[in-house]
Amino acid sequence: MGWQLPEPLQPLTAPADPDGYRLGEIIVVIPPRERASRADLAERVAAAGYERVEDVREWQHFRPRTTPWTRGGPARHARLRRSDLLLYLSEDEAGGGQRLHAVGLLTTGVERLLAGLGTAYAPRA
């Protein structure tokens, strides 16, 4: 069973650098049999190195936990501290699937974790 995605998307490949990150958006299409909950997402994202802060409307809001003493030094630390991650889980996929929108700072660890829930895409520019 499959369904069409309304906007043009391109499949994402897993990031190579284990310490990498990027600012952007990914969309994860979660098949009906897998299902995800907001509470489960919050736990997984926290385990990947983020802390939960106050939600923004229906979006779950996170900030990366980081210290200046990890790889990359103070400059990387400052960039990470200013960057947020917002997650929105929708239930509107045909056939009972879900769609997860992740916008903001995506570290390699959390991007792989979210992609493990389904198929990860990026909006085509």
Image (cartoon, rainbow, N blue to C red):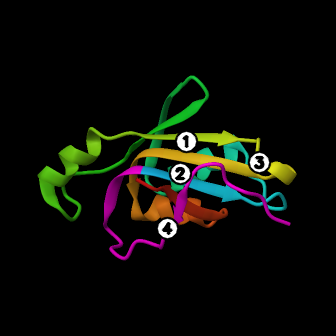
| Quarter-of-image position of residue 115 | bottom right
Left or right of 79? Residue 124 is: right
**Label 1: which residue?**
87
Q: Which mark is residue 12?
A: 4
Specify start and end residues of the magenta stretch as a single range: 1-24
Q: Which mark is residue 121?
A: none
- Predominant secondary structure in magenta? loop
**Foreground: 10 or 78?**
10
Vertical placement of 80 versus 16: above or below? above
**Foreground: 72 or 94?**
94
Circle 2 sits in a helix, a strand or a loop, which is it?
helix
Q: Which mark is residue 93?
A: 3
Cβ–Cβ under 8 Å for marks 2 and 1: yes
**Label 2: which residue?**
45
Amino acid bearing label 3: Glu
Say whether disc 3 or disc 2 marks the residue closer to the N-terminus.
2
Cβ–Cβ under 8 Å for marks 1 and 3: no
